[in-house]
Image (cartoon, rainbow, N blue to C red):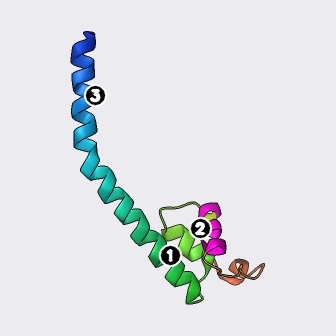
Amino acid sequence: MSTDPADAYARLDAIRVELGPVEQQAKALRREAQQIALDLLRAGEDPGDVAERCPFTATYLRKLAREAGIPPARQGRRSAKPKG
């Protein structure tokens, strides 16, 4: 990598232009994943199962569910499932 500031700024400008469409696509995919996860929770799917397949943390998923008016899952529901 060049240590010339003009080269470094030019590369940063190029990266910013290249990232624009990628960031927009990522935002659209995150919105889609949020909607699918919330639909699954509304349908009564196990929150732990949804969180395992979701690109979000379980904490963030709970936050999304609360904001969407989805009641919390019953305690201990997940532990009743056999492992494996």
Residue shown at 28%/28% (left/top)? 12
The residue that label 1 is drawn on is 37
Residue 84 visible? The answer is: no
* Left or right for 55, reference 84: left
Query: Where does residue 10 sit, x and y in percent of width and height?
Result: 21, 23
Q: Earlier in the sequence, mark 3 or mark 2?
A: 3
47 magenta-colored: no
* Left or right for 34, reference 72: left
Residue shown at 42%/67% (left/top)? 31
Residue 43 visible? The answer is: yes
Magenta segment main secondary structure: helix
Q: Which callout, 3 or 1, points to the residue nearer the camera?
A: 3
Q: Which residues are magenta?
A: 59-67
Say what amino acid the circle numbered 1 marks.
Answer: Ala
Q: Residues within 10 Å of mark 1 (few under 14, many from 20)?
A: many
* Left or right for 61, reference 31: right
Q: Earlier in the sequence, mark 1 or mark 2?
A: 1
Query: Where does residue 45 sit, x and y in percent of width and height?
Result: 57, 85
Q: Could you say whether the residue bearing mark 3 is in a helix, strand or loop?
A: helix
The residue that label 3 is drawn on is 12
Q: Are marks 3 and 2 in contact (CB under 8 Å)?
A: no
Q: Quadrant of residue 2?
A: top left
- Quadrant location, the C terminus: bottom right
In this view, 9 is above or below 40: above
Query: Where does residue 65 sit, x and y in percent of width and height?
Result: 62, 74
Query: Where does residue 75 sit, x and y in percent of width and height?
Result: 78, 78
- Quadrant location, the N terminus: top left
Mark pair 1, 2: CA separation:
8 Å
The residue that label 2 is drawn on is 61
**Nearer-the-camera pick, 43 or 84:** 43
Q: Which numbered circle lies on residue 55?
A: none
Q: Quadrant of residue 3?
A: top left
